[in-house]
Amino acid sequence: MKTEIHRFKPLPLNKVKLNGGFWGEKNRLAREKVIPVQWRILNDELPGAELSHVIKNFRIVTGETNGQFHGMVFQDSDLAKWLEAVAYSLTTNPDPQLEALADEMINLIGRAQQADGYLNTYYTLKEPEKRWSNLRVCHELYTAGHMIEAAVAYYQATGKDKFLKQMCKFADYIDGVFGREEGKKPGYPGHEEIELALIKLYRVTGEERYLKLSKFFIDQRGQEPNYFVLEAEAAGEEFSADNKHFGLKYYQAHLPVREQVTMEGHAVRAMYLLCGVIDLAIETGDNTLLETAHRLWKNVTQQKMYLTGGVGASSYGEAFSFDYDLPNSTAYAETCAAIGLVFVAHRMLQLMPEREYADIMEKALYNGVLSGISLDGESFFYVNPLAVSPEVCEKRHDHSHVEPERQKWFACACCPPNLARVLTSIGEYFYTVNQNEVYIHLYGNNIAKVGLDEGEVQLTQETAYPWEGTVRISVSTEQPVRFTLALRIPGWCRQAQVCINGEELNLSTGLERGYAKISRWWNNGDRVELSMAMPVERIYSHPLVAANLGRVALQRGPIIYCLEEIDNGPNLAAISLPSGSKLTTQYRPDLLGGVTVITGEAMRVSADNWGNSLYAPQPPMKVKTGFTAVPYYAWNNRGRGEMLVWIRET
Amino acid sequence: MKTEIHRFKPLPLNKVKLNGGFWGEKNRLAREKVIPVQWRILNDELPGAELSHVIKNFRIVTGETNGQFHGMVFQDSDLAKWLEAVAYSLTTNPDPQLEALADEMINLIGRAQQADGYLNTYYTLKEPEKRWSNLRVCHELYTAGHMIEAAVAYYQATGKDKFLKQMCKFADYIDGVFGREEGKKPGYPGHEEIELALIKLYRVTGEERYLKLSKFFIDQRGQEPNYFVLEAEAAGEEFSADNKHFGLKYYQAHLPVREQVTMEGHAVRAMYLLCGVIDLAIETGDNTLLETAHRLWKNVTQQKMYLTGGVGASSYGEAFSFDYDLPNSTAYAETCAAIGLVFVAHRMLQLMPEREYADIMEKALYNGVLSGISLDGESFFYVNPLAVSPEVCEKRHDHSHVEPERQKWFACACCPPNLARVLTSIGEYFYTVNQNEVYIHLYGNNIAKVGLDEGEVQLTQETAYPWEGTVRISVSTEQPVRFTLALRIPGWCRQAQVCINGEELNLSTGLERGYAKISRWWNNGDRVELSMAMPVERIYSHPLVAANLGRVALQRGPIIYCLEEIDNGPNLAAISLPSGSKLTTQYRPDLLGGVTVITGEAMRVSADNWGNSLYAPQPPMKVKTGFTAVPYYAWNNRGRGEMLVWIRET
């Protein structure tokens, strides 16, 4: 059954010019710092960083250098994601030198590509005869997907089609290998990614085969007889389909996608699959895919998501845990998984502008994604727990997956270049538009050029968001244009005001799915002012989240706060927040690149006068203490120490 | 340096006749149920239990049956501990049939013993040429120690010396293998046990070489160059001495014993080592050992012990974690480790009667030890956490070491026969005596015959302890005897009264190290009545125990309480106890074999009216709810469900 899909397309990156402000600065950091530093890492030139070897792998394939392949089977994808980030950077900020570097890499990739179109340095160097023999584990299609995404982005950025053609050749070859037809492999990737990439490729090339191939991968997933089971049997490999942690659920291959009720398994894979499902639903109007997307979205966001937008609670399998199981200190919440959730939310917004989608996209961006990168852009968290004690991480094996400090790079380095591509393309997440509607989902300084049926308009946002709740939007247009401007009133905002040219809009007639919609003729110079009340909110968890019972978190606007040892002393767990105590905010331009901090009075359980005994029939003394909370994303930028999001409330 | 050690010897098992009551019933259970059921298991005759194969291993060695060795390298020790339990049972309750069974096993052991005295079915069957080549891992000396303990107990029980002689032969052989002398191995066991066993053997045989050998093992431990490091090198095995979890600390071999400041590594090993250290201090008066024992005792009991007397917080390495790290739901707290703590405390009492030692011995016995066995004596916990959610245990890998229900047996079956030997010998833990002092450490119905310098007296205890705080002690003696009766006033007891022949003793002049000491001429028929106030106490943790901040536990007398799902519904974490709320007790003869339950009013966070969102700016609704707490040791005797000791306090 086919449903008419509302098509709200993201306003493309080249139409959104960031002008400083929160995301503008993050974008600048990504372009000016992250891309060059990662270039050094990909070339193994950064001292103290985990060896990448990715470019060397390509040069070994081409015979330009000698050596052995080093790295993960998906090591190529680090270069692909870096190239994708470069493409976004070039889109907004052309840079001939950087473009030349990218061209050089694209040429290298071309030389490393096999005659039949195949591209993968691991298999080419290590096991050339084993191509496609272990789809479940070996990430060939995943790596291909990242290469395709990069090629599409580079084509869109530069208009140059060399990389795109290389990847079309690769995709054509893949299309010849996979499918239900006699002689083809009825398989699909162990790590999803190519599904969404093929739809991007379809969109720029118009080649229906790519859409069909994506659909095949999604449709085929989890069908009986199970491909992964057969594949493992054929290879004589042990694989237990029912294994709790690494069985078919880990791969979202335990059921056909349309029959999946809960989001299971490896969180990044799950998010990328969901992206492909939504993209395919958008392109095909397939109602069963839409329902699946909505069902799985609900499960993730209503049962399996940290307050920060982090997903994947379990380090074992880097996976979703069961509903409401959201432990704080052992959380995995991989940076890539939060990024995946942003990708999903961004696609949900393309189905239908619902505030909820943008709320979660914003929540993940400002918190669980951004925590992945240091303020200087040079170090990264892979794992993003909501409570960290360095001593516990160091000494307890069940916390051994948690690095209490950001790292320069990783043996499995998926997160850092993923951050690079998100931050360089952040402008694309601000708006979705159709013929006569402009939805604003994110607030931040930028100038957007929107082509509507009735002509092009320019919208300029000015704001100190997320530290202040006022957003000024001015309209530039050569002639009056009739269109609808839809402003997201975030879910966290309980009081908002919209003024048009100084006159207050009556919001009491209701928002539409969380958006204040203004349909009118717009004239050049029209000004809209959105004022969002932004008090500190005490946030509570669903009562089934055992880890957070009796605990409260602090949020202001989209920003989740945390306590850090450097501000509050050691043993943060001893601090409790009296319910109803006064909370004060202050913008501190000097601190952490400029943040609003929350201060107030708390209680601290004191060991003074307790004595030596471990247990006693009297409660320990409590003393008043001041506390300072800082944005979660900015923690661990002032040295090693404890961190805590969910504070006991007393 | 040598110190004069106060020698308080335990009143031996054959002098203490249990007469029903709490421990009397546990003792009866052990004799009448546990021993016969374990006999069936050791013979692989109990359906549904993990295969033991222990007796078959011996019969394969002797050639009476064919087959392959099966089990752990220390599988023999299961039979040894069972025989030790049988010996204790025969001590208090002679049983010719059981004795014949034991004799049959002892004959079998004799036939399996090698000509040179060596005994170990694993090595004899599997790697005869590799004896003593892997002391660090392979438990030969540990297994020897258990055999020696069993032989000593059997000799004391029956006067028959066959088993004892077999084990003397084994010990003599070991004495020939180990030592500092040229041609001997300067090694020591990876799992301590033989140290304390050799001292037992020395005490019954008077053979100084056994004491010397024990001293050698203790003195040599952790000396440089490190034996385990050399041994691993010689075998070409990888062993990282500094490994956080499985390095030398795991074996308490990171430093010479006298230089160890904190108790580290595998908890059972650590406890058995400490037993040996104290035994050796008792025998030698070595002041440096005494100091070591006190220092390590303090570290364990003041920084590393669960409220239940469980020790060893970390499942990884079955080990002590760092100070104050006492997580509840992931606790390992192996039953054997709590038993080890009882052994240690019992030995500390032999150094000096201090209430603290008896308090902790009692705490571990009533809680962390007894939780290891079901009320019917047929199933066992290896791991004893203080919070259990079956769903979490089943689904979360970091809880995969926790069985939410007791098991019939284990592949590594150290705990069940360890429980058997503790419960069959429980009478030995009640009293310590010297020439003219009788210390009562445990209360329970029994008749004790005490030989003092001035003659023998008989003490009869009558009490409903631990459910009631009144203990009646009557004295039988043929003629008046002057001695000191010292009654432990437990640390948990804030109000106690002692009456002699109806006249109240003035306790206000102070207790001596926690004991009410009554020195007088005792006449036949003298009656002492001890009344201990036994209200429910709310117990709190040291503020550095992060897991218990804001939480309270309930204790009454020596019994730690818990909430169970069967009484309180699911999601126990949602329950909180208002501080100061009324707590009521009721003895329920029908419940769990007869227990006092605690009931009262609590609050429960309710999911009603919360809605679907994971997070919200309003706290969830709280509703009043009744609650029932039952003794921790008795949990999981009414089916699968959640359990919780530390309850949030609001």
Image (cartoon, coloured by chain):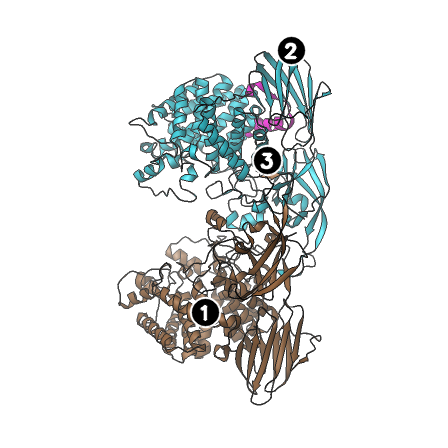
Chain colours: A cyan, B brown
Q: CA distance from mark 3 to mark 1?
A: 58 Å
**Residue type, numbered disc 2:** Pro
Q: CA distance from mark 2 to mark 1?
A: 93 Å
On the image, the x and y values in percent for residue A51 come to 47, 37
Residue drawn at the location 39% of the way across and 54% of the way down: B237
**Residue type, numbered disc 3:** Asn
Q: Is residue B252 left or right of residue A471?
A: left
Callout 1: chain: B
Secondary-structure class at tag 1: helix
Location of mark 2 (residue): A480
Please tell me if label 3 and label 2 are on a single chain: yes
Above-or-below relation of A173 to B18: above
Q: Is residue A132 left or right of residue A591?
A: left
Mark 2 crowdedness (10 Å alpha carbons): few <14, some 14-19, many ≥20: some
Q: CA distance from mark 3 to mark 2?
A: 39 Å
Residue A418 seen in the current view: yes
Residue B1 seen in the current view: no
Location of mark 1 (residue): B29
Span of residues in magenta? A8-36
Please tell me if label 3 and label 1 are on a single chain: no
Q: Is residue B24 left or right of residue A463?
A: left
Callout 3: chain: A
Q: Is residue B468 magenta?
A: no
Q: Is residue B170 left or right of residue A545?
A: left
On the image, the x and y values in percent for residue A170 come to 38, 24
Residue drawn at the location 40% of the way across and 26% of the way down: A215
Above-or-below relation of A631 to B537: above
Mark 1 crowdedness (10 Å alpha carbons): few <14, some 14-19, many ≥20: some
Location of mark 3 (residue): A367
**Residue type, numbered disc 1:** Leu
The residue closer to the viewer here, A388 or A433, is: A433
